[in-house]
Amino acid sequence: MDKKMDILIYFQNNIENMDKIEIDDLKDLAGVSWDVLQSETSLSNKAIAFEILAYISINNKLDLCERWTMYWALFSKKSLLDSVVDFSDILDLAYTSIYEEIKKHIPDSLMEPIDEVDSDTIVILTGKFNSKESKITKRIMDCALELQKNFNKKIYIINDNSTHFKPLEYMDVLDFSEYNEGNNGFSEIIYSDRKLYYYQNGNVMPDLQAISNLVYNLRNMKPGIILFSGFCSITFDICSSFLSSCRLNSIMLDENMNGYLKDILDEAGIEYIEKECYVDESKFFDIVADRKVDRSQLEICKQIENRVHNIQAYSLDNMWATVFNSTVVGSEWLEDTSLSPGRAAIGYPGLYALYRVLDEFRPKNLLEMGLGQSTKIIGAYAEHFDANHTVVEHNQSWINFFLNKHGNKPATKMVCLEVKHDLYSGRRVNTSTPINYYLNFKEKFGDKKFDFIFIDGPNGSSEFSRVDITEILPECLADEFVIMLDDSERNGEKRTNEVICESLHDAGIVAYTTEVVGLKNTRLIVSENQSYLCTI
């Protein structure tokens, strides 16, 4: 095992050398990485193996099906390492690299907007469809049944078989037994005395021809909306660029399904007719007699409230995506808009606020904590306007990969600081539980001045999160300033925001604050003379 770890540590420190080895050696390296990830007991060693395998999954020497199998194999292991390293960014990058490779080969004629749709037709797209006894499959059929029976819609269930993986001889990964070859092709399913139309792709995924054929058929069907049940599907992500779409929340399909589906159709602007109404006598209750509070009912109300909140958040994110894409059209300084927002990365609300702040405020000295999608925007801004851009990141391999892929811009300086997970005792924050923080942050930046600070690192913590900046506030701020705190809806970031505002107030600095809201929120804290930015 020591020899294997020596190999992995070498490539961790020399990521660029992966591009120099032959494909057979690359596959051998993948096999070694997977073996360590499976059998090693040390979480830190597992993390190294995970990182190496993630970079291999991005390497285009391997075919797309091999990379797709690796991506899902890694995804199945990610939760085991969340306490050590957050690999969300690199997994997103792996998915995006496969998606972009597929998308660029899709014929342009299949990507054009559709003028008119058939609102009476709805497609439910999934990546896995097992036996009728499967809980996941039953949810999909229940959803189709409700849409057909109660909302008077023609429903098609399409399984693109995203989880039909290519076996890898050099990696013993995943269980392929769930794939049911007998379901391939078009068929009719009888479920609760109703007929449901079903199609299953039989190709190992992601197959370019199969995906293109599904996109072609979906364009011809012109459904009012595509509903997706599952984690991710390249077919769905491609179609959602020109058809109304929504990801089904599997939890919401357990209870109050009609209400949830009604909200989806309302949001998509689809008319419907509720046909089969009835009275449920089991729900009769005495309105006169004294009754104790039914805690189960309170819990159901709470669940419904949470679901409504999620629906509203998805709607807001869709709105912010449209606003952001419209705003950057014809931008003076942001030419490359190939961004991958969401999941662990900054969301569309934050991207919009970030672009508007930079474009309106025009800061000269910028500090960014956490390397990611925001770095592409801030780096482009700094390069165009000859500003000073400093990025703090704890993962040197991620820095190397980012620079190899996007280039080393003269205006941007990368600073790698180690992250420690421990109790924190600082200038304004003391914790009772361990949190993540950068070592030597104050020593590195205590004598610097910034007019723009973007906080999205290190990885979040629950009690307090991303507290490093509180060590150098308010001395590090220029007279005019903007601070942006991503993930501000989380408890740790909320408490850090309170400390930031208190430190400014104690120093007699007048500041204004606002929050841009979506699936993920971003908090703005601005100097008095920049208060107009709170209205963007």
Image: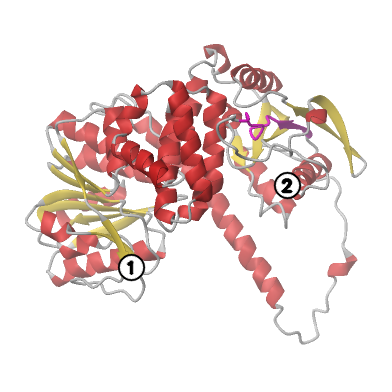
Residue pictured at 43% horizontal, 26% vertical: 25
- Colour basis: secondary structure
* Residue identified by numbered label 1: 495
Instruction: Say which element carries label 1.
Output: helix
Label 1: few (<14), some or many (≥20) within 10 Å? some
Is residue 240 visible in the rendered structure shown here?
A: no
Q: Amino acid at mark 1?
A: Arg
* Residue identified by numbered label 2: 136
> Is 159 within the magenta?
yes
> Toward which corner of the image does residue 289 lie, by quadrant?
bottom right
Query: Bounds of the magenta span?
Result: 154-167
Most extreme residue toward the bottom is 290
Left or right: where 392 falls relative to 170: left
Left or right: where 275 falls relative to 69: right
Q: Are marks 2 and 1 in contact (CB under 8 Å)?
A: no
Label 2: few (<14), some or many (≥20) within 10 Å? some
Q: Amino acid at mark 2?
A: Ile
Instruction: Say which element carries label 2.
Output: helix
Pinpoint residue 448: horizontal percent, then vertical percent.
8, 53
Residue 417 vs residue 353, the one in the foreground? 417
Is residue 24 visible in the rendered structure shown here?
A: yes
> Is 339 within the magenta?
no
Residue 219 vs residue 175, the one in the foreground? 175
Tell me the number on the disc at residue 167: none
